[in-house]
Image (spheres, rainbow, N blue to C red):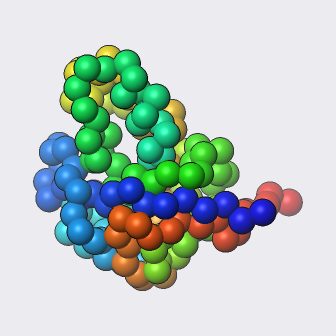
Amino acid sequence: MEQKAIICAVCISEKKGEQKHPVERIKLLPHHGIAGDAHAGDWHRQLSLLAQESVNRLQEKVPFPLLPGAFAENILCEGIQLSALPVGTRLHIGTALCEVTQIGKECHADCAIRRQAGDCVMPREGIFAVVLEAGEAKAGDEVSVIDRYEEL
């Protein structure tokens, strides 16, 4: 059964240390990540994805709105349990082809969202990927699992 999600928002930040903000569309480039995003580069975390369902669970516990980009995610989507995808999973994100490289991450002890909300879902439920084939993505586009890496 093919797994699909819908992109709720695409976000970038122009400088590291700033919260990401929604943009109309993003351009994904191989060996780089998202054009114009401060975290782009030739490394294993070219883009980050977070499930809207993860944000919704934390939203129930805080009195202020958790807006797209609040967790420094590039792509906020709904419909797939992202943290359950193994490293090596290939995804179509809009028209780009990407590969999952990391599940979760170590959180900065003083990250803005942790200070405000007392918790951060990105370290547990966010995923990171590299861009294999160029493309574009925008809110309303699909994220689909096309291939899972199987260890021999």
On the image, which quarter does residue 144 sit in?
bottom right
Residue 43: percent from left, percent from top: 40, 62
Residue at 20%, 52% (x, y): give it: 21
Q: Is residue 95 visible?
A: yes
In this view of the protein, which residue sits in the foreground, 92 or 2? 2
Residue at 67%, 60% (x, y): give it: 3
Question: How many labels sit on residues?
Answer: 0
Q: Is residue 46 visible?
A: no
Residue at 31%, 30% (x, y): give it: 108
In this view of the protein, which residue sits in the foreground, 13 or 110? 13
Looking at this rendering, what residue extends furthest in the right direction? Answer: 152
**Vertical relation: 100 (above or below) 125:** below
Residue 1: percent from left, percent from top: 78, 63
In this view of the protein, which residue sits in the foreground, 96 or 129? 96
On the image, which quarter does residue 70 sit in?
top left
Q: In what quadrant of the picture does the C terminus appear?
A: bottom right
Residue at 39%, 23% (x, y): give it: 60
In this view of the protein, which residue sits in the foreground, 6 or 36? 6
Residue 47: percent from left, percent from top: 39, 59
**Vertical relation: 42 (above or below) 68:** below
